[in-house]
Image (spheres, rainbow, N blue to C red):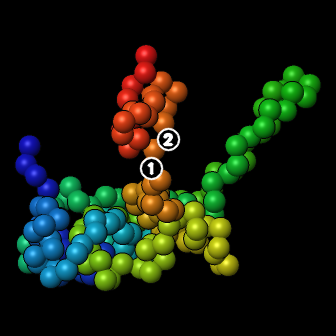
Amino acid sequence: MSALIYPVAHDGDSALSSPLGHALRAREAEGIAGEAVIFCSERVGPPCPTREAAQDLLARLSAGAAPPPDPAIIRLVEVFDGARPPPPARSLNEGDRRWPAPPAPPRTVWRIQVDFWRPASRAPAILAAQARHVRKRAQAELSGDHLSAFARQPLRPVRPQQPLDIGLFEIRAPENPDRVLPDE
């Protein structure tokens, strides 16, 4: 199995057509970008009604790239078209029916999603904050792409971790209170 070499680019569109370079690891990508990098996924191009139309769009977008992008870093994903998924159904238990009639499925479209290394200075400012703070303090509705990016980012603490408490079966050493000993 060969390793995937991801493009280093400022955004998803340039990752497909004209990346700054290609790197296997973050250290290599930092050398190409000249600064710290973050690994991200971004949806590019307009939404397409069918999978075949999305494949045609992908062929047009990546046609100008000198080394063609690796197919493993590009995915065609089906997403909801501006609507939220339907809420879970609640049991009805009326007459001889337990569940209500299902609602019509929401309309979906196909999008191109590319994985790449992005210079940290080019990341959207909203993604620099912690997800729960943005969700609580955001005045405007967040887009689906931002919510997806928040779901993929690593968890970050709200504040530095406090010293660990002494457990139930631990005691402090009488001669050295900074040392914790197990007590069985």
Tell whether label 2 touches label 1 (CB within 8 Å).
yes
Residue type (three-letter) at the residue carrying disc 2: Asp
Is residue 69 shown above or below 77?
Answer: below
In the displayed structure image, the side of residue 103 where residue 37 appears, left or right:
left
Question: 76 or 183: which is nearer to us?
Answer: 183
163 displayed left or right of 28: right
At 36% across and 39% down in the image, what residue appears? Answer: 176
Q: Secondary structure at mark 2?
A: loop
Q: How dense is the environment of label 1, judged by Cα within 10 Å: few (below 14), some, or many (20 and up)? A: few
95 lies above or below 21: above
Q: Please tell me which residue lies in front, 68 or 182.
A: 182
Crowding around mark 2 (Cα neighbors within 10 Å: few <14, some 14 to 19, many 20+) is few
Mark number displayed over residue 163: 1
Q: Secondary structure at mark 1?
A: loop
The residue shown at (70%, 43%) is 88
Q: Nearer the viewer, residue 75 or 34?
A: 34
Quarter of the image that includes the N terminus: top left
Q: Is residue 5 visible?
A: no
Residue 66: % across, % down: 8, 78
Q: Which residue is mark 2?
A: 165
